Amino acid sequence: MKYLTQLLGKRVLTPDKTYIGRVTDLVAELGGRLPVVRGVLIKRKSDELSLPFSEILFNEDPAGPQGSGRILGDVYLRRPLETISLYQPDESQVLYLRRDVLDRQIVDIHDRRVVRVSDVRLAVCGTEYCVVGVDASFRALLRRLGAISVPIEALFRLIGHPLRSNLIAWDDVQTLERSAQGGTIRLKVSHDKIARLHPADIADIVEQLTPQQGAEVIESLDTETAADAIAEAEPEVQVQIMQQLDDEKATDILEEMEPDEAADVLGDLPEARSDELLDQMEPEEARDVKELLAYDDDTAGGLMTTEFVAIHSYLTCEQTIQYLRELAPKAETIYYIYVVDAENRLVGVLSLRDLVIAPPETPVSEIMEPNVIRVHVEDHADEVAQILGRYNLLAVPVVDEEERLLGIITVDDTLERLLPPERRPRLPTPALTDSTEAES
């Protein structure tokens, strides 16, 4: 194996030992599972050469394949310089390992964290060298000091704390590149790796980035995934990202979110920005969100969503199931079906299980439970959480003073209030721990 930093700065000589310059970067071509190293940049006195990587030779690690990858001595060309054709990369299909990867932020997909690359690991793939991973460890930083790292590593081994590499496989890496315009980043390769993560994991990653960087990641996702990820983020991060997004993307995300989640986000935004986005939302979605914004955050009204299933008692089970098929995609939960009268007053509830096992022609009024556990719209959020926990409910309906059904509150909306105080914060993301792979 080899590491990028062990090649950088190496003197490059011709076969007759004429000095040409020093290695300044390696160029890897994308397209396959692993980037293949195709080019080497050599800095001369007055210019920079770009040569095929296959045209250089270097000594193997004297410790063999299990060594640290040290390269002793100089780098040589295989043949005279004048006989070698220059390497001309397709800039849209390559990574410059020093410029684009080294010391840059990357997303470790496996551990769902953002780290800074201290070195790039190379290995032989058939007849070529490939990028097989990155190293984000203290050992990698030490390696860049050159020969002085050897006695330091020996000292750590002597005191019983051998240094280990924190190797992240390339398959688990999402590379990020700073744009030429400033501090924002662009996804250098396909964002599919991030998009395949659970929204909560995407939120964890976004929270480790700057607001500009987080917005770049959110913009790269499809609207549904972006909405789910924003909903999982901490409130301050939600605000920062929504401030960074353009109006169209921000509006699309809000319309994709559940009304209660969209109301939470808009309620935390500055009033001018909130009003601006509400004006651009579809009238129906905006109306639902505005209704929820009228309630205090710590009340049942502030927690509830207006996406629920309500039916009339005169329907049969078969008619209700057909109705559910049409409505289910728009409802937050269909485990409970609420029954209302002509004035929209709550008169009963039935579970999805009861509905499915009942004969199709059975009227809903015969199988519904008329004594419904409910909360009132002005009840405090802590009371709502206690009721959900006491009665083991997945959701509880919210009614006004006249018992009209206004919305429902699902258990996930009150989960933090049900946890002991010491467990309420989100679990921290993994620290930069060393891998279990030790290298001698």
Image (cartoon, rainbow, N blue to C red):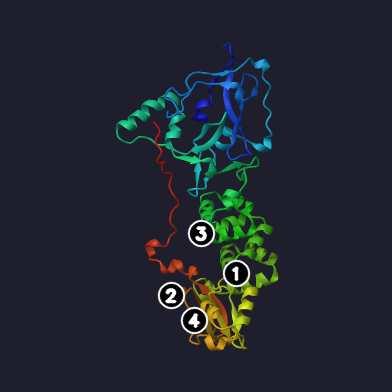
Depth check: 123 or 383 in front? Answer: 123
Give the CA distance from mark 2 to mark 1. 24 Å
Q: Is residue 294 visible?
A: yes
Q: Quadrant of the C terminus?
A: top left
Q: Nearer the viewer, mark 2 or mark 4?
A: 2
Give the CA distance from mark 3 to mark 1. 17 Å
Q: Nearer the viewer, mark 2 or mark 1?
A: 2
Q: Secondary structure at mark 3?
A: loop
Give the CA distance from mark 2 to mark 4. 13 Å
Instruction: Name the residue tied to disc 2.
Output: 392
Instruction: Name the residue tied to disc 3.
Output: 234
Instruction: Name the residue tied to disc 4.
Output: 374
Q: Nearer the viewer, mark 4 or mark 3?
A: 4
Give the CA distance from mark 4 to mark 3. 29 Å
The vertical placement of 123 against 43, above or below, is below
The vertical placement of 382 against 185, above or below, is below
Depth check: 361 or 247 in front? Answer: 361
Tell me where residue 131 appears, x and y as whole percent.
55, 35
Give the CA distance from mark 3 to mark 2. 27 Å
Q: Is residue 345 visible?
A: no
Give the CA distance from mark 1 to mark 4. 20 Å
Q: Secondary structure at mark 2?
A: loop
> Mark 2 belongs to which amino acid?
Asn
Q: In the image, which disc is placed on residue 259?
A: 1
Q: Dot 3 surroundings within 10 Å: few (below 14), some, or many (20 or more)?
A: some
Tell me where residue 75 appears, x and y as whole percent.
54, 20
Q: Are marks 3 and 2 in contact (CB under 8 Å)?
A: no
